[in-house]
Image (tube, helix red, strand yellow):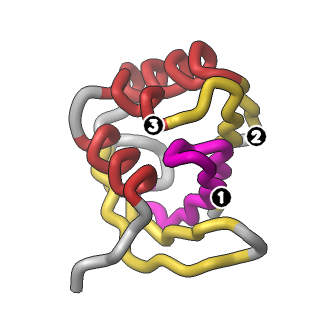
Amino acid sequence: MTLELPDAIESYFEADRGRGEAVADCFSPDAIVKDEGNTYRGIDEIRRWRSDVAAKYTYSCKPQAVDQQNGHTAVACRLVGDFPGSPANLRFLFAIAGGKIESLEIVP
């Protein structure tokens, strides 16, 4: 089954599979990411967040389902890798505007 994801979200997951710093290019300049109890604001912090994750862990993320939830696009994913708690099922809650990600919250 192929999921139909908005272009910005498809770009995010493609960038996450490849060159890590490309993830930040998917976000608007003042975007916000919330992950593991931390909040990252703006492209520079988002780039550092993604670089830190890539330096600590090797993983793969497979989107399995997509739906709309309170104005966000919710993507259910299965992450498998060398991080504590692997494998994990997580939800990625995206807000998109102007073809860029404005916010992303990653939750169990």
Q: Residue furthest front?
A: 98
Which residue corresponds to the image point at 41% horizontal and 25% vertical from the top-left? 56
Distance in Å between CA atoms under marks 1 and 3: 19 Å
Q: Amino acid at mark 2?
A: Gly
Seen from the viewer's position, the closer of residues 84 and 99 is 99
Residue where numbered disc 2 is placed: 37
**Which span is picked out in magenta?**
86-106
Q: Residues within 10 Å of mark 2 (few under 14, many from 20)?
A: few
| Side (left or right) of 41 relative to 15 | right
- Say whether residue 87 is visible: no
Q: Amino acid at mark 3?
A: Cys
Q: Residues within 10 Å of mark 3 (few under 14, many from 20)?
A: many
| Side (left or right) of 84 relative to 30 | left
Q: Amino acid at mark 1?
A: Val
Q: Quadrant of the N terminus?
A: bottom left
Q: Nearer the viewer, mark 2 or mark 3?
A: 3
